[in-house]
Image (cartoon, rainbow, N blue to C red):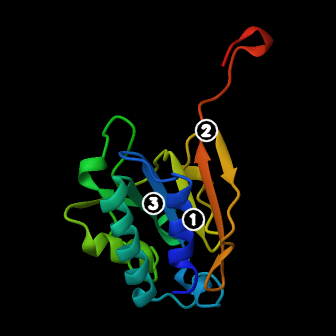
Amino acid sequence: MEHLQQLLDELKSIEFFNENELCIIGCSTSEIRGSKIGSNGSMDVAKELFNSLELIHKETGVHFAFQGCEHINRAITIERERFDAHSMTEVSVVPQVNAGGSLSTYAYQQMKDPVVVEHIQCDKGIDIGQTLIGMHLKHVAVPISIETKCIGEAIITVAKSRPKLIGGVRAKY
């Protein structure tokens, strides 16, 4: 897939992926293919993305969460071992290509013990195709400037989070 490996190599070079952090992935395989979001999903594209991200997980120890589409209220698919009952609410849905999106569906099918949650607060994220991942990032989200601007035809946005600065002019950071 055009520019996927370039993006992942670029993010590895700036140490974007860190062990035990949680990275939200929002993705429109339709946008990657040059179509309107939600109109032309592809399990083949999802498979390539997921497999590439799985390699990153094995190399760096970062964990991925996969945002579903608006038809499942952008619920997130994660491995059950990442589930935290104190901060997450499990929902009863199984992502499907036309109700959840191709990548979320493929991830659910590949995971050992998948669970879908309503909300999550991730350390960082990659948005492929303007899927609006901001609702799943910790406050404060900080955009990351990258050279790789697209995967296929999909626009890429990358962000990380940082702790809030509190205390005003007398505080030390």
- List the residue tagged with mark 1: 10
Q: CB atoms at circles 2 and 3 under 8 Å apart? A: no
Residue at the spot 77% in from the left edge and 15% down from the top edge: 168
- List the residue tagged with mark 2: 139
Q: Nearer the viewer, mark 3 or mark 1?
A: 1
Above or below residue 82? Residue 13 is below
Using the image as rendered, state which of residue 153 and residue 85 is in the foreground.
Answer: 153
The residue type indicated by label 2 comes to: His
Residue at the spot 24% in from the left edge and 49% down from the top edge: 81
On-image quarter of the C terminus: top right
Residue 23: x, y in percent?
Answer: 46, 54
Q: Which mark is residue 64?
A: none
Q: Earlier in the sequence, mark 2 or mark 3?
A: 3
Residue at the spot 67% in from the left edge and 63% down from the top edge: 146
State how far apart marks 2 and 1 are (Cα): 24 Å
Q: Earlier in the sequence, mark 3 or mark 1?
A: 1
Residue 44: x, y in percent?
Answer: 40, 90
Relative side of 168 to 53, left or right: right
Q: CB atoms at circles 3 and 1 under 8 Å apart? A: no
Above or below residue 79? Residue 7 is below
Crowding around mark 2 (Cα neighbors within 10 Å: few <14, some 14 to 19, many 20+) is: some
Residue at the spot 32% in from the left edge and 41% down from the top edge: 84
Q: Nearer the viewer, mark 2 or mark 1?
A: 1
Q: Which secondary structure, mark 2?
A: loop
Outermost residue on the right side: it is 169
Crowding around mark 1 (Cα neighbors within 10 Å: few <14, some 14 to 19, many 20+) is: some
- List the residue tagged with mark 3: 75
State how far apart marks 2 and 3 are (Cα): 19 Å
